[in-house]
Amino acid sequence: MMPRWFLYLQGFAMIIMGVAQLRLRPRAEDDSFYTRYINLGTMWSLICCAVGIALLGMAQGYWTWPPTVPSRPPLR
């Protein structure tokens, strides 16, 4: 089992990395909207943010991995 502090640390790090990649990516002044935002770098940044949010959800206890299996009722 992974400690909670590690999930918090990695979750915040992934979110910061994704936002920084979106914000600090080099761009040319005459780039179109498509060239600027619809590319592999943007997809990777959004994936980093999504993984960071998932890790924070795991740290808070909203999501568990592997999913908990409901116990069966006892046989009589």
Image (tube, rainbow, N blue to C red):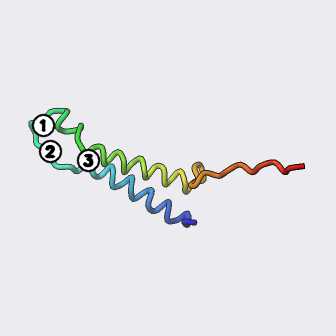
The residue nearer to you, when weighing 66 against 27, is: 66
Please tell me which residue is depicted at 39% across the width and 56% down the height of the picture: 14
Furthest residue toward top: 33
Q: Which residue is mark 1?
A: 31
Q: CA distance from mark 3 to mark 1?
A: 15 Å
Neighbour tally class for label 3: few under 14, some 14-19, many 20 plus, Cα within 10 Å: few
Local SS, label 1? loop
**Could you tell me residue 8's position as x and y percent?**
49, 60
Local SS, label 2? loop
Neighbour tally class for label 2: few under 14, some 14-19, many 20 plus, Cα within 10 Å: few
Local SS, label 3? helix
Q: CA distance from mark 2 to mark 3?
A: 10 Å
Q: CA distance from mark 2 to mark 1?
A: 7 Å
The residue nearer to you, when weighing 1 against 12, is: 1
Q: Amino acid at mark 2?
A: Arg
Q: Which residue is mark 3?
A: 23
Please tell me which residue is depicted at 30% across the width and 48% down the height of the picture: 44
Query: Is 18 above or below relative to 2?
Result: above
Please tell me which residue is depicted at 46% across the width and 49% down the height of the picture: 53
Please tell me which residue is depicted at 16% across the width and 49% down the height of the picture: 26
| Image-quadrant location for residue 37 | top left
Q: Which residue is mark 2?
A: 27
Furthest residue toward right: 76
Q: Amino acid at mark 3?
A: Arg
Report the quarter where the N terminus lies: bottom right
Contact, mark 3 vs mark 1 (Cβ under 8 Å): no
Contact, mark 2 vs mark 1 (Cβ under 8 Å): yes
Labels 3 and 1: the sequence-earlier one:
3
